[in-house]
C-alpha cells in the first residue's frame, strides 16, 4: 500500500478539514434552532397547563416586561414579519460564515449547502400536524408562519449554494461537472425547492392551490432523498431525522382520516353551504373552533363536542365540494382531524368575559363555535356577521347562533344561481369582505394590506323614534337577530357593546383601560376584515385583547 493511497481524495475527508467543520456547524445550527423553538413551545405548553390570569392584566402592563418575553414572542413568530425574517436571516448568515478558514465563494457555497440541509428537520417539524385536544399538543397554526418564513430564508441559502457552484463551473469551463450524477441530483432537488417556494407564495397559491397541495409533500420526500446521494460528506443522520418526521406525518394522516358520507347538505346560496357530517368523524372531545380537513381544504368546525352532529359552513370557489341534489349525500368524503385552533383562539375561549366577534362570510363557522362555547361559560358575546347575500342568513339558525347582528353588504342577494363568469368573479375579488376558505392565523403577515374603508351604511344606533336605521323589515334569521344593510362602524358597535360613553372614556380607552380585563375583540374571515379589525382594536381600545383568524387560500 502506497503512502499516497492513505491521503484522502478530497480535502477534509480525514475529519480535520473544512468539510468536517461544515458538518460540525451544521449540527450546531440544527441544535440551536431546535432549542430556540423548543423554548417557545415549552412556554406555550406551560401557559396551557397552568391557566394564567393574563386577561386581568392590561396589554400595557405586559409590555413592560423584560426582553426575555420579547425573545419568546419572536421565537413564536408573534412579532412583525420583517423582524422574523431579519432574525432568521441573521441566524443563517451567522452559521454560513462563522468558522470559515478563509472567505471564498466556493467555501461559502459548501457551508451554505450544509446549513440548508441541517435546517430541513426543523422546517418539517414546524409543519407537523397532530390532531387531538391535549395540553401537550400545540396547534400547527401557531407554527405555520414560522415554517413558511424559515423555509423561505433557508431557500435563499440553498440558492446561494447552487448559484455559486454553477457560476464556478461555467466560469472555469468545467460544465461537464454539472452532468455528474451526484451534481445532477442536487440540481433536481434545487429545482424542486424552487417550485415549492414559488407555489407557496400567496398570489400563486390562490390560483393553483391544487398544484401547490399535491406538489408540496411529494417534493419534500424527494428533496430529502435526493440530497442523500448529492451531499459530500454524507448527510445520513440529517436525512434519517427528516425522513422520520415525514414518515410520522404520513402515519398521522392515515390514522386520523375517516371516509364518510354527509348526513345533509343545505345550499344557502350559489357558493355557500352547510354540510352536516356524522358525529363519529370526531373524537368525544375537541376544542371549540378546531378545524378538520375535508378533501384538500381545512374548514373550521362550527359545532361543539356536545352536539349530535358535526356542522361545517363551506364556501365553494372554483367548483362545489359536493354535487347538488341527492348525490350530495351519496358522495364519499375523506375527513381528517380535528386540529386544534391557534393558541390565541383557545385563550379567548378560556378567558374572555366579554367578546365582540366580527365575522365575514364563512368566517361565521369560527364565530359559531367560539360564541356558543363562551355563552355556555356565562360570558357576554355578540357576533357581528357580514354577508354579501341576504339568502345566506339562514346559516345562523342552522349553526345555532343567536347572539348575532347581520350586515348585508351587497345590494344583490337573491336566490337565483349565477353562472360564475368573469364579471362576477371580478366583483367578488375586489370586495375585501368576500371570503375564501383556507384558514391561516393572522400574525402580522398582512401589514401591507390595503386599508379597508368601513363606513356604515345602515347604522347600528337607533334614531329618535326608537327604530333602527338601515334594519331590514323582513326576517330571514333566527328570532331576535337584527339585520342591517351596509357595513358596520366598528367604533359604534364597540362603544355600544363595551358600554363606552363619550369622548373622555374613549380617550381613556385609547391609552389602555385598566377595567377591561377579560374583554376581547375577535375577527374571522377575509384578510381585509381581519387586518382592519386588528388595526382598529389596537388604535382605539388598547386594553382589549385581539385574536384574528384569516380565511385565505
Image (cartoon, rainbow, N blue to C red):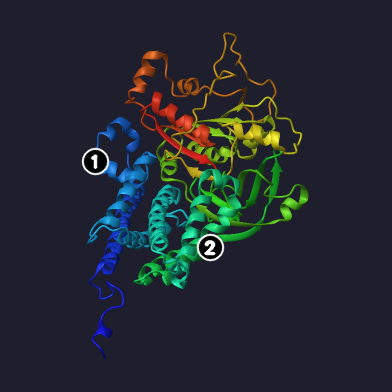
Question: From the viewer's perspective, is 540 left or right of 216?
Answer: left
Question: Which of the 4 image quarters holds residue 33?
Answer: bottom left
- Position of the N terminus by quadrant: bottom left
Q: Alpha carbon of mark 1 to alpha carbon of mark 2: how far? A: 41 Å
Question: Which of the 4 image quarters holds residue 318?
Answer: top right
Q: Nearer the viewer, residue 205 or 431?
A: 205
Element under label 1? helix
Of all residues, the one furthest to the top in this rendering is: 464
Q: Which residue is mark 2?
A: 218
Question: Which of the 4 image quarters holds residue 482?
Answer: top right
Element under label 2? helix
Q: Residue 99 location, x and y as percent?
A: 22, 59
Of all residues, the one furthest to the front in this rendering is: 173
Q: Give the number of the disc on residue 67.
A: 1
Q: Residue 320 location, x and y as percent?
A: 69, 47
Image: 182 above or below 362 = below
Which residue is pictured at 73% across the width and 55% down the height? 330
Amino acid at each position: 500500500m502506497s503512502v499516497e493511497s492513505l491521503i484522502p481524495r478530497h480535502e477534509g475527508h480525514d475529519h480535520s478539514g473544512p468539510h468536517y467543520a461544515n458538518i460540525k456547524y451544521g449540527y450546531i445550527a440544527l441544535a440551536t434552532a431546535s432549542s430556540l423553538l423548543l423554548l417557545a413551545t415549552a412556554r406555550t405548553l406551560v401557559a396551557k397547563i397552568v391557566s394564567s390570569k393574563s386577561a386581568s392584566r392590561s396589554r400595557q402592563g405586559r409590555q413592560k416586561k423584560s426582553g426575555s418575553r420579547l425573545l419568546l414572542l419572536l421565537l413564536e413568530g408573534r412579532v412583525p414579519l420583517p423582524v422574523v425574517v431579519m432574525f432568521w436571516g441573521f441566524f443563517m448568515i451567522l452559521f454560513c460564515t462563522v468558522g470559515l478558514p478563509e472567505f471564498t465563494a466556493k467555501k461559502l457555497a459548501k457551508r451554505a449547502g450544509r446549513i440548508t440541509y441541517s435546517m430541513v428537520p426543523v422546517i418539517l417539524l414546524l409543519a407537523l400536524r397532530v390532531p387531538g385536544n391535549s395540553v401537550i399538543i400545540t396547534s400547527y397554526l401557531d407554527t405555520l408562519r414560522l415554517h413558511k418564513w424559515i423555509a423561505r430564508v433557508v431557500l435563499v441559502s440553498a440558492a446561494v449554494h447552487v448559484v455559486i457552484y454553477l457560476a464556478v463551473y461555467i466560469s472555469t469551463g468545467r460544465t461537464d461537472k454539472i452532468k455528474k450524477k451526484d451534481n445532477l441530483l442536487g440540481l433536481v432537488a434545487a429545482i424542486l425547492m424552487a417550485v415549492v417556494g414559488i407555489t407557496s407564495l400567496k398570489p400563486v397559491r390562490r390560483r393553483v392551490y391544487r398544484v401547490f397541495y399535491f406538489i408540496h409533500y411529494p417534493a419534500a420526500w424527494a428533496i430529502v432523498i435526493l440530497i442523500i446521494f448529492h451531499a459530500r460528506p454524507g448527510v445520513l443522520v440529517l436525512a434519517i431525522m427528516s425522513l422520520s418526521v415525514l414518515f410520522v406525518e404520513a402515519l398521522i394522516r392515515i390514522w386520523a382520516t375517516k371516509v364518510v358520507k354527509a348526513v345533509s347538505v343545505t345550499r344557502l346560496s350559489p357558493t355557500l353551504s352547510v354540510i352536516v357530517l356524522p358525529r363519529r368523524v370526531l373524537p368525544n372531545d375537541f376544542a371549540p373552533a378546531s378545524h378538520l380537513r375535508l378533501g384538500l381544504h381545512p374548514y373550521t368546525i362550527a359545532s361543539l363536542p356536545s352536539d349530535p352532529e358535526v356542522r361545517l359552513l363551506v364556501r365553494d370557489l372554483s367548483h362545489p365540494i359536493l354535487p347538488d341534489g341527492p348525490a350530495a349525500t351519496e358522495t364519499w368524503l375523506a375527513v381528517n382531524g380535528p386540529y386544534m385552533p391557534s393558541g390565541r383562539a383557545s385563550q379567548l375561549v378560556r378567558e374572555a368575559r366579554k367578546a365582540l366577534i366580527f365575522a365575514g362570510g364563512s368566517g361565521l363557522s369560527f364565530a359559531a363555535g367560539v360564541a356558543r362555547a363562551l355563552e355556555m361559560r356565562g360570558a357576554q358575546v355578540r357576533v357581528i356577521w357580514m354577508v354579501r347575500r341576504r339568502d345566506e342568513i339562514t346559516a345562523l339558525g342552522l349553526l345555532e347562533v343567536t347572539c348575532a347582528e347581520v350586515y348585508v353588504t351587497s345590494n344583490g342577494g337573491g336566490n337565483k344561481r349565477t353562472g360564475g363568469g368573469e364579471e362576477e368573479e371580478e366583483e367578488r375579488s375586489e370586495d375585501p369582505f368576500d371570503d375564501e376558505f383556507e384558514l391561516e392565523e393572522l400574525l402580522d403577515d398582512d401589514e401591507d394590506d390595503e386599508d379597508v374603508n368601513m363606513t356604515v351604511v345602515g347604522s347600528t344606533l337607533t334614531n329618535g323614534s326608537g327604530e333602527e336605521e338601515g334594519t331590514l323589515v323582513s326576517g330571514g334569521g333566527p328570532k331576535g337577530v337584527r339585520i342591517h344593510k351596509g357595513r358596520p362602524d366598528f367604533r359604534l358597535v364597540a362603544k355600544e357593546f363595551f358600554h363606552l360613553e363619550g369622548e373622555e372614556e374613549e380617550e381613556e380607552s385609547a391609552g389602555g383601560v385598566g377595567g377591561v380585563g377579560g374583554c376581547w375583540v375577535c375577527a374571522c374571515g377575509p384578510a381585509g376584515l381581519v387586518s382592519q379589525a386588528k388595526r382598529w382594536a389596537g388604535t382605539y381600545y388598547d386594553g382589549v385583547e385581539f385574536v384574528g383568524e384569516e380565511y385565505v387560500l
